[in-house]
Amino acid sequence: MVISSRTADGHVVRILTKLELKNRSQVAMWAVQHGIVRGEYGF
């Protein structure tokens, strides 16, 4: 399955808005802090 970059950008905007964050880096940190993904060093 393939999605366009415009579709992906739209999803990112909605995630940022919902989580009240400003950029993708903050989303990554949020995901680590909430145990959704593990950081590079396991924390």
Image (cartoon, rainbow, N blue to C red):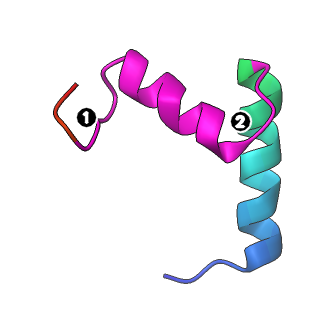
Question: Is 32 part of what is drawn in magenta?
Answer: yes
Q: Name the spot of residue 30 as percent of width and height, x first.
A: 52, 24
Q: Is residue 38 left or right of residue 22?
A: left
- In the picture, which quadrant includes the C terminus? top left
In the image, the segment drawn in magenta is: 20-40
**Under tag 2, what secondary structure?**
helix
Residue at the location (75% across, 76% down)?
5
Give whichever of discs 1 and 2 has the lower sequence position. 2
Residue under numbered circle 1 = 38
| Res. 13 image quadrant | top right
Q: Type of residue at label 1? A: Arg
| Res. 26 image quadrant | top right
Q: Callout 2: few (<14), some (14-19), or many (20+) C-alpha neighbours within 10 Å?
A: some
- Vertical side of 6 occupied by 16: above or below: above
> What number is the disc on residue 15?
2
Q: Type of residue at label 2? A: Ile
Q: Which of 29 and 7 is in front in this view?
A: 29
Question: Is 25 part of what is drawn in magenta?
Answer: yes
Residue at the location (45% across, 28% down)?
31
Residue at the location (34% across, 28% down)?
36
Q: Name the spot of residue 12 as percent of width and height, x first.
A: 73, 49
- Vertical side of 3 occupied by 33: above or below: above
Residue at the location (61% across, 41% down)?
25
